[in-house]
Image: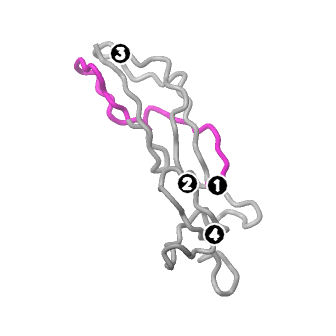
Amino acid sequence: MKYQDGSNTVNGYVVGVRTGSALGDAADPTNDGYDHLRNAEHVGTVIQDADSDAENPTPVLISIEITTLPTKTNYLVGESLDLTGIVVTGSFSGGSSGTVDVTVDDVTGFDSSASAASQTLTVTVDGCTDTFDVTIS
């Protein structure tokens, strides 16, 4: 997306256009911001932080996916959450992807105080989420 003066920044932030679904598609700073099929403007989306360099923009996390489950997904009542082995892959603005660090503080929904045939845990990193299930016996 470009403004009339040819720039694509507002107060130091690069502005792009998010196309498609919020989870699957990255913001596209090369999009002209015009939807030719609907004959309408898109809404701009900030896709990098103000401290990043225009030549080497800081990628922004767009989505996460749990690509390898933790080794332990079956727990006994009273056990603590163990994320050993989990691999979370992040998709970033600009099309890059990479492993994202996850800690127990990034996981919600774990409660081993009582048995549960299935308990869905949510991993959240920078506002992006994915889920996996565990059992408590």
Whether residue 119 sits left or right of residue 123 in the image: it is: left
Q: Which residue corresponds to mark 4?
A: 31
**Residues at badges 2 and 3 in contact (C-beta under 8 Å)?**
no
- Cα distance between the residues tagged 1 and 3: 37 Å
Q: Quadrant of the C terminus?
A: top left
Residue 53 versus residue 6 in the image, above or below: above
Occupied quadrant, residue 98 = top right
Calculate the distance from the C-alpha at mark 1 to the C-alpha at mark 2. Answer: 14 Å
The Cα–Cα distance between marks 4 and 1, rounded to whole angstroms, is: 17 Å
Q: Secondary structure at mark 2?
A: loop
Disc marking residue 113: none
Residue 2 % position (x, y):
65, 78
Q: Which residue is mark 1?
A: 59
What range is drawn magenta here?
93-121
In this figure, which residue is indicated by the disc labeled 3? 75
Earlier-in-chain disc, 1 versus 3: 1
Q: Secondary structure at mark 3?
A: strand
Callout 3 amino acid: Tyr
Tag in front: 1 or 2: 2
Label 4 sits on a secondary structure element that is: loop
